[in-house]
Amino acid sequence: MNFASSIFLMFFIISFILWWILPLRLAKVYLIIANLVFYGFWFPPFVFILIAVGLVSYTAAKAIDMDRERGKYWLIASVLFCLGVLGYYKYANFFLSNLFGLWNLVTSETSGVFLQIVLPIGISFYTFKAISYITDVYRHRLNAVRNLKDYFLYITFFPQLLAGPIERATNFIPQVDNRKFPGYEDLQFSIYRITRGFFLKLLIADHMAISVNSIFASNYQQLSAPEAWLGALFFAIQIFCDFAGYSDISIGIARLFGFITRENFEDPYLSTSLGEFWRRWHISMSTWFRDYVYYPLARSEWMNSRVHKPLSDTKLKGFSTSLNTVIMFLLSGLWHGANWNFVLWGGMHGVGIVLERQSGLYAWQQKHVGIWPAAILGGLITMVFTILAWVPFRTIDLQSSISYWQAMLSGGLTWRISSAILLNGLLWFSVYAVVQLVLAFTRRAADSLTGGRLRVIQSWLYFTALLFISVPGTDFIYFRF
């Protein structure tokens, strides 16, 4: 059930009305059922996987709360269950293909057996929500939820179910029983975010996709360097507008149901360093990996025990920190999909951040923060690196990534892509640039209580553009993750 479909509009209207007119106890039951119907719209059996993850995580958290001495075992068992479900559906064939690839390389045979698996939509998001909930209960950051309805409302909440943001139970659960009908400011905020989200997705991302798909479907060996760079740049804009658009719609809808959820993007392409980029890009995922992967690795001693003894404590700590950073980004890359391209993408960002810090570039930027030349230089370096790193995210395999990079770096100047395709991309890139500049300079006013009039004007502009400009309409990119 796509946000941009007429059937979703009917679903939303009915759910919104019943959520607010029914008594809270019945409203919870209805909304949980509605969430499951929404999720099962693509493939009904997927609902049972979602319910299983919800029941296991709910039961494990209660057991941890009641028996702290054995809580560690409940934590390990339940997290392994969630990771096992995710691993089977998302990575089983990936590991099998690599295993058979190694076997065939050693034995010179050609063999392989693969499983007929349909990837459940949104499984990466709700399994991570479940894991964060169990872990937070174990860490005493949250008491286990006693009411099954409250927990299932959290784990199945439809605006966040398919592509996030990965909301924390510590933020969502306390709001469940504090139902408060949205006021005028809430309605303004919601309409503004929803219309902005559809504008970013349907007008910019989907129109940009026409140029991106044409360029990445061409023969990379025949691409000129400018065409290759434009294709990568267009994809960088497309994926941001696609995902940020979904997050905007999700945040706006959640507010209409009385839930204040955390932001997921904060103008990432205005970052002046890679570290800053990851504090602004897909914030719910990057903070998830920071809190549940990086920090546990940093606190553990298993890394240090394997490092050569003569290293000084300072060097040891620096090596361990760098290694933990790279591991975290490799895993975040793998989270995006069962493909070595995603691992390469994550690894590039991990190594990039390590080099940025070890080279002193980050310290230099911090020392000259607020100085325009330093900010411009840092922004250009970050943007160029990010565009290069998006290539393996978009191409189908490692060889394709290498070929595309070769075109970017040594593709010559002979233009082969249709001028209409390039002009389409440049047109919507220009629209994006203007919109982002306006948003960057008006965000504080628009998001403040005194910015209601500005929000109304922007909402009308987005809505009017959606009415009068043709919209291709495609699924959100992050549905596949």
Image: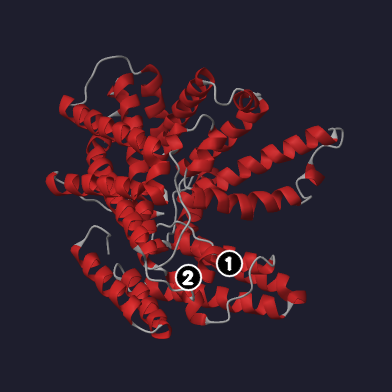
Q: Let me know if residue 285 appears in the view.
A: yes
Residue 217: image quadrant is top left
Please tell me which residue lies in front, 19 or 333: 19
Please tell me which residue lies in front, 434 or 329: 434
Mark linked to residue 154: 2
- SS of the residue at dot 1? helix
| Image side of residue 337 versus residue 199, left or right | right
| Image side of residue 25 versus residue 8, left or right | right
Residue sticking out furthest to the top = 413
Residue sticking out furthest to the front = 450
Residue at left 41%, top 67%? 258
157 to 340, vertically: above or below: below
Residue 130: image quadrant is bottom right
Marks 1 and 2 in Cβ contact (< 8 Å): yes
Q: Position of residue 270 (x, y in %)?
A: 44, 32
Q: Position of residue 286 (x, y in %)?
A: 54, 48
Residue at left 62%, top 28%? 366
Q: Which residue is mark 1?
A: 133
Mark linked to residue 34: none
Q: Amino acid at mark 1?
A: Tyr
